[in-house]
Amino acid sequence: MVHWCHLRNRRQNIFTLTIWSRLKYTVFIYIYIQQTILSHLLSAHLLQEIRLLFSMQLCTTLTVLGLLVTGSWAQGLMPTIRLPPCDSPEAEAAALVAQDFLNAQHTHGYKHVLNQIDEFKIVSRPLQADTYHLELDFLETTCHVLDPTPVSLCPVRQKINTAIEADCDFVLANTTLGLSVVAFKCSTETESVDECLGCPQLIPLNDTDGIQLIKTSLDYFNKNNTLNTKFALLEIGRMGSQIVSGGPRYFAEYAIIGTNCTSQDDDICIPQNHAVAIHGLCLAEGSANGVDCKIFAPAQASNGTVPVQQLLHAHTFGPQHNPAIHDLKHHKLTALHDPSASGLLSAESIELMEVMPAAVGVPAAKEAPIVKREVAAPEAPAVDATVSEKATLLSEPILLAPVCPGKKKHF
């Protein structure tokens, strides 16, 4: 690709020099005619024709030179696209920045962990920061977003428990300050085991029986915990049911928040501020006393140096929470986040599309920006030194290993 670009530029420079030489030669002839005796020997009509031909040729030559100059200037502004392997350290570093940003910007649902890098490209433009375009697959973990546990240590929810997968497109800017997220969009869907009879099934987050289980189990926890704090419902994470011999068995996961009440007998309780409140995640199964709650330390106590980020989606419900606003079976990530209205995720620009020929020797439909795919060729097999050079040239081309998508980290 680089050799072809140099060859094209060389041909363009030779053509420009040819046009320029022709222009100088034409001007010289015209001046010679005007300043010599030939102008007196030629008739006025013939001299007028010569002047007209000269004007037309001069106009054509200047037009061609203008197009060449404009084309060279536009080529200098054309973006360069680099396509590193999806499992390269550069791609992994950018994907982890996207993962941390995604988890930090949400206060509802669960943390998500990177599963696979589908696509990765770096777009470079003159006098601008490089932009990283990534297509990423995330999987939901069992850690709530308020859980201070690092996402790398959070268990991934398995398919048998109806896993949640998110397909996200990210755009990052690589500035002198490092990588930063410009925009992202995500679509969320469920992943479950096919034809699993008797497996737990998700039910809507406003299911009446599931909400009753949450209410009774939270009352039981408030009466029996030793934290000297009455907790209120913050949000419902997920609810499900499973058919057993005695009928449907319900389970629920829900987040709780500490209130200003210290006694179970207090009726009017106000949830505390998120910065100082105690949070937790409860899992209730079957009956009210089958509840287990994991309590988190207040956010300031875990790390007071972390700046508070803008929240994209937050819930503060308290005891008056009405789960009817979530007529869904699972939480979804932000569909589109583009605060600077960059438009980089609304539609792929034509100039950023990778245009490849349909077959060897068939040119592309139109000129595309310079695209460089970085590949790692597989180890070449040992070759007998006696094999002739002709036989080597006639051998089949070596197929390079695919560089994208990257390897799956989970399933």
Image (spheres, rainbow, N blue to C red):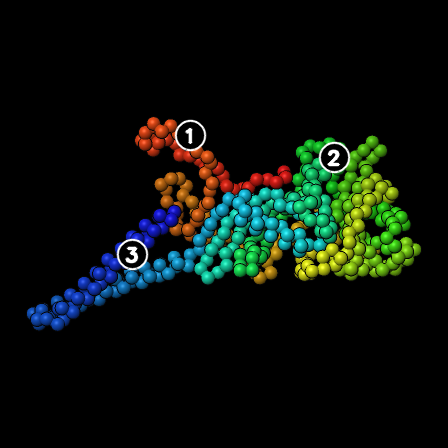
- Circle 3: residue type: Asn
Q: Nearer the viewer, mark 3 or mark 1?
A: 1
User: Cβ–Cβ below 8 Å for labels 1 and 2?
Assistant: no
Q: Earlier in the sequence, mark 1 or mark 2?
A: 2
Say which residue appears at 22% left-offset and 63% top-offset.
23
Q: Position of residue 327 (x, y in %)?
A: 73, 49
Spatial CA span between label 3 and label 1: 44 Å
Question: Could you classify mark 2 by the number of other residues whose Cα lies within 10 Å: few (under 14), some (14-19), or many (20 or more)?
Answer: some
Q: Earlier in the sequence, mark 3 or mark 1?
A: 3
Q: Is residue 120 above or below residue 313?
A: above
The residue that label 2 is drawn on is: 199
The residue that label 1 is drawn on is: 382
Pick the residue in front: 24 or 151. Answer: 151
Say which residue appears at 57% left-offset and 44% top-offset.
117
* Quadrant in which the C terminus appears: top right
- Circle 1: residue type: Ala
Spatial CA span between label 1 and label 2: 52 Å
- Is 331 situated left or right of 120 in this image? right
Question: Could you classify mark 1 by the number of other residues whose Cα lies within 10 Å: few (under 14), some (14-19), or many (20 or more)?
Answer: few
Q: Is residue 244 above or below residue 231?
A: above
Say which residue appears at 47% left-offset and 36% top-offset.
378
Pick the residue in front: 241 or 316. Answer: 316
- Circle 2: residue type: Cys
Q: Position of residue 321 (x, y in %)?
A: 80, 55
